[in-house]
Amino acid sequence: MSRFSVVVAAVLMAFAIPAAAETRIGVVDLRQALFSSEDAKSFSETLKKDFAGDEAKVREVQEEARTLKERLEKDGAMMNESERKKLAGEFQEKVKEFNFLKQRLDSTVAQRKQQFLESARPDVDAAVKELLDENDLDLILPSEAVVYVKPEMNLTSQLLEKLNR
C-alpha cells in the first residue's frame, strides 16, 4: 500500500511540474502605482490645502509647548514654587492640547486617505484585470510577496499608465 502511495505521488508530481512551468505570472507594486498616479497627486494636493490650517495650529501649539518647556528648564530653578507649578501646569496643558490636535488631525487625514483608497479600488481592479488579459497572465502578485522578478514581468509601470488614463 505504501508503494502505491509513492507511485501515485510521483505521477501527480510529474503532471504538476509541466503545469507549473506553463503558468505565467506578473508582478505589480500596487502601492507605488496607486500613489504615483495623477489622481493620487491631485488628492495629495487637495489634502494639503484642506488641512493646512490644522497643521499650522498643531505646529503652533507644539512650538508654544517647546517654549514653555525651555523656559521651565532655564528659569525653573530661580522661580518660587507657585510660579514653577503654574508654568509646569501651562506646559502640561499645552502638551495635552498638542496631543489632542495631532491625534484628531492624524485620524481625519487617515479617514480621508482610506476613502481615497476605497474609491480608487474599482479602477485599480479593472486596470489589473486588463493587465492580466493583455499580457496573457494566469496570476498577478503584489511585489511585496515576491523575492525576485524579471524586469519584463514587473508590470507596475503599465499599471500606472492604465490608472492615469
Image (spheres, helix red, strand yellow):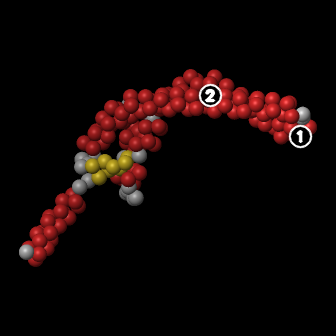
Is 132 rendered above or below residue 112?
below
Residues packed near mark 1 inside 10 Å, few (<14), some (14 to 19) or many (20 plus): few
- Please tell me which residue lies in front, 30 or 4: 4
Q: Earlier in the sequence, mark 1 or mark 2?
A: 1
Residue found at the very far front of the displayed protein: 81
Rendered residue at 56%/22% (across/down)? 50
Q: Position of residue 57 (x, y in %)?
A: 67, 25
- CB of mark 1 within 8 Å of CB of mark 2? no
Q: Is residue 85 in view from this perspective?
A: yes
Residue 49 in the image, given as x and y percentages of width and height: 58, 24
Q: Between residue 65 and residue 85, name the one nearer to us.
A: 85
Q: Please state the horizontal and vertical placement of residue 127, each as a whole percent of the image.
A: 32, 37
- Check disc 2 and report its element: helix, strand or loop: helix
Q: Would you identify the image quadrant in which residue 98 lies?
A: top right
Mark 1, residue position: 77
* Amino acid at circle 2: Leu
| Position of the N terminus by quadrant | bottom left
In this picture, residue 149 sits left or right of residue 89: left
- Where is mark 2, residue-wise? 101
Query: How many badges with numbers are in the image?
Result: 2
Q: Residue at point 61% right, 29% down? A: 100
Q: Quadrant of residue 115?
A: top left
Looking at the image, which is closer to me, 58 or 163? 58
